[in-house]
Image (spheres, helix red, strand yellow):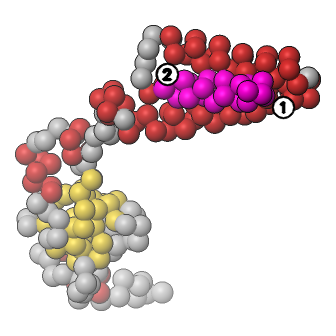
């Protein structure tokens, strides 16, 4: 058999052993064998075919080794051992503590309320007689506008203007526009 073929086989064996070492930890035994195989393949190429072929094998090894390691580490989480070691990323519902307040806020999704203050983007809303701090999706909301709760993320209530965006009638005189109070002009009558 041609010595160049032996060099190529040792190179392939070394790359295969590197991948197996990543996937099946052996305490460094397979890693040692893979490095030995890679070095032996490069030395055989230098010895039997000269500097040009030797440097070609050295370059191929220098490129193929990181690529093989990258592929092995990318594939590793899909292996049974990788799944046991690397746990799934938990969802926010699994990490955050469950409290009566959070459950109550989650029940607010879809309900309609009234903006109690100017929301740029945060402010107060009233839903079912309860005042809640809320955030808008980014658009300002005037006091008295009807809002719909669209999401609850953590302890943040997110609202948007309700489809029927007509101002709601409230008993709070301070939340009504001044035109509805029936006051005459505040201009100085003597001026």
Q: Earlier in the sequence, mark 2 or mark 1?
A: 2
Is residue 36 rendered magenta in the image?
A: no
- Image: 191 above or below 55: below
Q: Nearer the viewer, residue 176 or 65?
A: 65
Q: Nearer the viewer, residue 187 or 144?
A: 144
As drawn, is 114 to the left or to the right of 186? left
Residue 182 in picture, x, y percent from top left: 23, 88
Q: Main secondary structure of the magenta part?
A: helix
Name the residue: 58% across, 14% down: 33
Crowd rating for badge 1 (residues with CA inside 10 Å; few <14, some 14–19, many 20+): some
Q: Point out the residue furthest to the front here.
A: 1
Q: CA distance from mark 2 to mark 1?
A: 25 Å
As drawn, is 171 to the left or to the right of 163? left
Crowd rating for badge 2 (residues with CA inside 10 Å; few <14, some 14–19, many 20+): many
Residue 171 in picture, x, y percent from top left: 12, 75
Can you tell which mark lies on residue 140?
A: none
Can you tell which mark lies on residue 56?
A: 1
Is residue 12 rendered magenta in the image?
A: yes
As drawn, is 105 to the left or to the right of 56? left
Residue 48 in picture, x, y percent from top left: 86, 20
Element carrying mark 2: helix
Residue 176 visible to the viewer: no
Q: Please tell me in which quadrant of the rendered image residue 137 appears.
A: bottom left
Q: Nearer the viewer, residue 49 or 80?
A: 49
Q: Nearer the viewer, residue 106 or 79?
A: 79
Q: In the rendered structure, are the residues bearing label 2 and label 1 in contact, judged by CB atoms less than 8 Å apart?
A: no
Residue under label 2: 21
Magenta highlight range? 1-20
Of labels 2 and 1, the one closer to you:
1
């Amino acid at each position: 058999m041609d010595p160049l073929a032996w060099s190529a086989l040792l190179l392939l064996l070394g790359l295969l052993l590197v991948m197996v070492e990543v996937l099946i930890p052996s305490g460094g035994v397979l890693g040692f064998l893979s490095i030995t195989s890679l070095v032996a393949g490069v030395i055989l190429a230098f010895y039997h075919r000269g500097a040009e072929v030797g440097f070609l094998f050295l370059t191929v090894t220098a490129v193929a080794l990181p690529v093989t390691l990258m592929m092995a580490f990318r594939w590793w989480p899909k292996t049974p051992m990788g799944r046991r070691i690397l746990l799934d990323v938990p969802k926010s519902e699994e990490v955050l503590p469950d409290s009566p307040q959070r459950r109550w806020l989650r029940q607010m999704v879809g309900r309609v309320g009234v903006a109690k203050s100017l929301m740029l983007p945060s402010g107060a809303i009233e839903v079912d007689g309860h005042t809640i701090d809320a955030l808008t999706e980014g658009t300002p909301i005037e006091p008295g506008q009807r809002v719909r709760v669209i999401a609850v993320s953590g302890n943040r209530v997110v609202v948007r203007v309700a489809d029927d965006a007509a101002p709601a009638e409230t008993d709070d005189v301070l939340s009504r526009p001044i035109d509805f109070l029936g006051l005459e002009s505040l201009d100085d009558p003597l001026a």
